[in-house]
Image: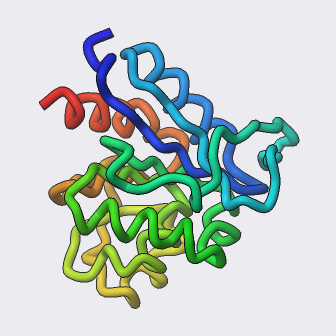
Amino acid sequence: MKLKNKKAGLLVEDIYNELEVWIPYYRLKEEGVQVTVIGSGTSLTYTGKYGIPIAVDKSAAEVKAEDFDVIIIPGGYAPDKMRIHPEMVKLVRDAVRIGKVVASICHGGWMLASADAVRNRRVTSYIAIRDDLVNAGALWEDSELVQDGNIITSRKPDDLPAFCRAIIETLSK
């Protein structure tokens, strides 16, 4: 429980990838991190790609980037729904701006692009959104993990061990 004083905001919306939500959720809790599940405000629960629901603790309008040490953006198709909500985009934009750790996996890069957080930054993502990130100014790489300053990115569920390890190591510094 070496990270018991750390706080994580985990973003969710409908059609989230269950592995990319629940594995970081429990892995961070295992390290003592207080994890807050944050939704867009359209519902009290959201359903993943495979039908597993998750209840939210707060809406994006109820929190600030300063409340957290890390913001985690899981994939699935949820980020496409998240980015139409200005409060969710603002949370990510503010977290990047003030130097908080922002960790995105798979389609989570859509939120980074919408928050204008990837210009001239090294990132990775699921291959299908590569062009979106490049068009937003990112320096895209095909690697299981890319860390550029406070931004941590991975491609897919297979990369979750490296993704979680990088978040934990970064929060430990």
Furthest residue toward top = 1
Residue 94: x %, y % from top left: 34, 67
The quarter of the picture where residue 37 lies is: top right
The quarter of the picture where residue 28 lies is: top left
> Nearest the camera: 107 or 63?
63
Compared to residue 75, the image places residue 169 above or below, namely above
> Nearest the camera: 59 or 124?
59
Residue 116: x %, y % from top left: 36, 81
Compared to residue 67, the image places residue 127 above or below, namely below
Going by the image, does 89 lie left or right of 66? right
Residue 124: x %, y % from top left: 36, 62
Furthest residue toward bottom = 135
Q: Residue at x 37, y 55 (%)?
A: 65
Residue 130: x %, y % from top left: 45, 75
Q: Residue at x 33, y 60 (%)?
A: 95
Furthest residue toward front = 62
Going by the image, does 94 lie left or right of 21? left
The quarter of the picture where residue 150 lies is: bottom left
> Nearest the camera: 107 or 10?
10
Going by the image, does 44 lie left or right of 19? right
Q: Residue at x 40, y 90 (%)?
A: 135
Q: Tally the numbered discs.
A: 0
> Nearest the camera: 150 or 161?
150
Quadrant occupied by the C terminus:
top left
Going by the image, does 166 lie left or right of 64? left
Compared to residue 25, the image places residue 43 above or below, namely below
